[in-house]
């Protein structure tokens, strides 16, 4: 990469920061909006990068690397940090050897998430510092600084991104790489967190927070930008950008780049210089509560929402400024365009079959969550990674026969490796009569095609270990493990009926690679013979975006259709024809 | 100068990424501060997608809000209509006339509004609509819709043909450059 000024995605700027900070080891699990940090870092040959099966394993691996003396990183989305919370909270006690930074990307507004939890709570609870950049330039600089803090204060450091920082490009000037290395030394009192040692480490954690609070008073991460003194605004992350957009220099701003722990005197001094103090922060009132605890009069969530992400108009409106308003509006209702399963998605055939058999479907996290969207409307639960299997087990245990012959779990291959295996162990061990369907599309789909332990390739696309799902399920004690092709509706229907009927747990692996994978060869698009189409709309029940009704006849958009043939299996009148030219 | 705002809107999978990359490159080489913002993940699966491109002396917010867009570039007619409230007074919408039915229309739960482009024109907004899909096919690939749109968009900027071409060459893989140059010219002269 050349070191000239360039536009860079926030996540790529973090990756550049990792490179320049001399990071040697990265282990992460993909999750929007964090994924590109690790994908971009993997482009540097100097950094070992991997996708771990889940965030907990990733964080423990990164910790091992830092213990061995090399700077390490682990990245995930906000809910991923819940999975990795267990090692994090005790890594706070052990501290680090070489620097360890943990990237966490929040998703205010839930563009691609099941909740909009505020990860700052984890930083407070785990008692580790949290750094928040507000654009790509800061993403690069703060990442490097995070390693200095990690080693100086002997602590893992949380680097918090949010959707608008992670997925925005702004101007960055890259620098050079230096690689600080430490030696590993055996230190049982520091690293073996049994009670006798942990009791002695907790005071260290509290002292470290004190030292970090003192550091926060003068840290370059926190800065005061004095302007008009009628209003003073304390803010962080992307909210800073909205505040500056609306007010420019008309207000004074205290921008916090270190949001845990927060300074005390710096805030008191800033408050004393302004007539009215307001905190502008997305999601929970964490800065605001800190300021209130200092006994300072402050406004915040009484003016600004606790929900969703902010924008310049929202900040303007909330703080009594005039927001921009639409200049042109239509009275016509504009139909929504929700995300849908792609044309040719292998999940579609299985969801159609589950609907046909009137199954209760407890779902999981991935592209197949879109099985809940009309017209399929098949999925009845989505909670967190791996929950489909645990929930199906509990559901079937309490409802017994009335449920077990029609209730299934659906879980993708990557999600199964992430945290479905332990749920499956519970089904095998405590013997619920559950049918578990692994939707194996041979990739981690929703986050944009990352490899996983079942695909046989690593993050760089090189051959890697490959876990055999059938053998794994059998080894756990499942006698009934079936594999079906979801493009074959008759086969799916028959196997599903058989496995629901039996009085023992079973696994169905619905296997076909994601239609968007580059190596997947598509068939010629189909077309509808309008003379044969009887307008029965049977084909509309699968929710394929390539099929629509035009002049009361089904029609296929040839730019979308990949010729999967699922629709033609549903048509009673043989109206679907191939456009393939006969050789 | 005041920050200028361009929105690129369409349906997930239509190739808006290249359009924003090219614009970002062009604006940066012209010496502006630039921010380009988009959302990845679930919304990309056939849903409405929006990319914000902002440039000026110093750009703060990465997003464009209601009533702020100087220009909206749309890959699909309904998406242009959806984003109309983001257009600033006197702004322009450059849109593909292609219609892609969203799922509620496919299932019959909603209807695709009739004559949506004329309806937009009737609001007084400046609407520059063209059949980019046909022009892209003429250039050699339906995937070139994005560059056809950029060609049309170039009317509303003061940048020279050479400056646009320099960015095109910097962004597009070499084997597709000639086809994309043709697509750009077809959009520009349509």
Image: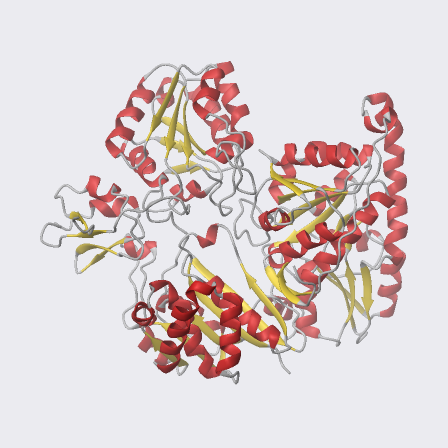
Name the residue nearer the viewer: A234 or B139.
B139
On the image, the x and y values in percent for residue B140 come to 33, 67
| Quadrant of the rendered image containing residue A295 | bottom right
| Quadrant of the rendered image containing residue B136 | bottom left
On the image, the x and y values in percent for residue B75 come to 39, 67
Q: Residue at x 87, y 45 (%)?
A: A152
On the image, the x and y values in percent for residue A68 come to 78, 33
Does residue B75 appear anywhere in the picture? no
Does residue B5 appear anywhere in the picture? yes
Vertical comparison of A166 with A321: above or below: above
In the image, A114: left or right of A339?
right
On the image, the x and y values in percent for residue A570 come to 21, 40
The colour style of the image is secondary structure
Vertical comparison of A388 with A138: above or below: above
| Quadrant of the rendered image containing residue A484 | top left
Name the residue nearer the viewer: A385 or A477.
A477
* Residue at the far left in the pictured view: A531
Vertical comparison of A76 with B159: above or below: above
Vertical comparison of B55 with B9: above or below: below
Q: Residue at x 17, y 55 (%)?
A: A553
Q: Quadrant of the N terminus of chain A?
A: bottom right
Name the residue nearer the viewer: B122 or A521.
A521
Name the residue nearer the viewer: A38 or A374.
A38
Badge count: 0
In the image, A3: left or right of A384?
right
Q: Residue at x 28, y 54 (%)?
A: B106
């Amino acid at each position: 990469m050349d070191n000239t000024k360039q536009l860079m995605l926030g996540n790529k700027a973090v990756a550049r920061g990792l490179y320049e900070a001399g990071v040697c080891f990265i282990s992460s699990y993909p999750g929007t909006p964090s994924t590109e940090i690790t994908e971009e870092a993997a482009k540097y040959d100097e950094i070992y990068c991997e996708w771990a099966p889940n965030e907990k394993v990733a964080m423990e691996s990164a910790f091992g690397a830092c213990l061995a003396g090399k700077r390490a990183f682990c990245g995930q989305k906000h809910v991923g940090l819940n999975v990795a919370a267990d090692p994090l909270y005790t890594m706070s006690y052990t501290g680090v050897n070489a620097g360890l930074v943990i990237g966490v990307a929040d998703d205010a507004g839930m563009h691609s998430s099941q909740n909009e939890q505020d990860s700052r709570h984890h930083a407070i609870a785990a008692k580790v510092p949290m750094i928040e950049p507000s654009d790509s330039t800061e993403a690069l600089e703060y990442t490097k600084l995070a390693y200095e803090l990690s080693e100086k204060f002997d602590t893992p450091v949380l680097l918090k991104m949010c959707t608008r920082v992670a997925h925005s490009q702004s101007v960055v000037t890259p620098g050079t790489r230096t690689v600080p290395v430490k030696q590993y030394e055996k230190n049982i009192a520091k690293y073996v967190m049994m009670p006798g040692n942990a009791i002695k480490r907790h005071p260290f954690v509290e002292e470290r927070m004190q030292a970090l609070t003192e550091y926060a008073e003068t840290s370059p991460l926190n800065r005061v930008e004095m302007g008009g003194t009628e209003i003073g605004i304390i803010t962080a992350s992307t909210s800073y950008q909205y505040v500056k957009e609306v007010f420019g220099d008309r207000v004074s701003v205290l921008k916090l780049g270190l949001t845990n722990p927060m300074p005390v005197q710096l805030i008191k001094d800033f408050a004393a210089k302004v007539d009215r103090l307001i905190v502008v922060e997305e999601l929970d009132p964490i800065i605001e509560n800190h300021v209130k605890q200092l006994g300072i009069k402050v406004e915040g969530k009484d003016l600004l929402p606790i929900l969703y992400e902010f924008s310049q108009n929202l900040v303007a409106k909330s703080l009594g400024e005039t927001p921009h308003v639409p200049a042109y509006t239509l009275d016509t209702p504009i139909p929504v365009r929700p995300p849908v399963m792609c044309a040719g998605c292998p999940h579609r055939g299985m969801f159609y079959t589950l609907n046909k058999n009137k199954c209760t479907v407890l779902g999981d996290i991935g592209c197949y969550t879109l099985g809940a969207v009309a017209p399929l409307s098949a999925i009845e639960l989505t909670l967190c990674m791996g929950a489909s299997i645990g929930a199906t087990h509990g559901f079937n245990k309490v409802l017994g026969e009335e449920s077990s012959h029609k209730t299934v779990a659906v879980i993708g291959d990557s999600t199964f490796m992430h945290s479905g295996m332990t749920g499956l162990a519970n089904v095998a061990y405590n013997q619920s009569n559950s049918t578990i369907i692994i939707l194996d599309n041979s990739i981690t789909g929703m986050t944009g095609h990352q490899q996983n332990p079942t695909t046989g390739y690593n993050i760089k696309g090189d051959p890697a270990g490959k876990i055999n799902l059938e053998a794994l399920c059998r080894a756990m004690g499942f006698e009934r493990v079936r594999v079906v092709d979801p493009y074959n509706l008759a086969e799916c229907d028959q196997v599903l009926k058989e496995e629901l009927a039996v009085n023992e747990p079973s696994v169905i692996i619905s296997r076909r690679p994601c239609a968007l994978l580059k190596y997947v060869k598509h068939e010629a698009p189909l077309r509808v013979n309008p003379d044969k189409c009887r307008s029965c709309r049977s084909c509309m029940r699968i929710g394929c975006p390539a099929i629509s009704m035009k002049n009361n006849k089904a029609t296929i958009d040839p730019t979308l259709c990949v010729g999967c043939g699922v629709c033609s299996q549903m048509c009673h009148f043989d109206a679907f024809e191939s456009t393939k030219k006969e050789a | 100068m005041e920050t200028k705002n361009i929105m690129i809107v369409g349906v997930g999978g239509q190739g808006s990424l290249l359009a924003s990359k090219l614009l970002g490159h062009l604006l940066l080489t012209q010496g502006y501060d630039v921010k380009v913002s988009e959302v990845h993940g679930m919304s990309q699966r056939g849903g409405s997608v929006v990319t914000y491109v902002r440039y000026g002396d110093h750009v703060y917010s990465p997003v464009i809000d209601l009533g702020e867009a100087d220009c909206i570039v749309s890959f699909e007619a309904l998406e242009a209509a959806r984003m109309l409230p983001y257009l600033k007074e006197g702004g322009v919408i450059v849109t593909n006339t292609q219609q892609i039915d969203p799922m509620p229309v496919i299932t019959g739960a909603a209807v695709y509004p009739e004559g949506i482009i004329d309806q937009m024109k009737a609001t007084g907004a400046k609407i520059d609509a063209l059949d980019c899909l046909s022009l892209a096919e003429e250039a050699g690939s339906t995937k070139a819709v994005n560059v056809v749109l950029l060609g049309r968009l170039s009317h509303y900027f003061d940048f020279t043909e050479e400056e646009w071409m320099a960015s095109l060459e910097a962004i597009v893989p070499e084997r597709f450059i000639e086809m994309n140059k043709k697509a750009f010219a077809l959009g520009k002269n349509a």
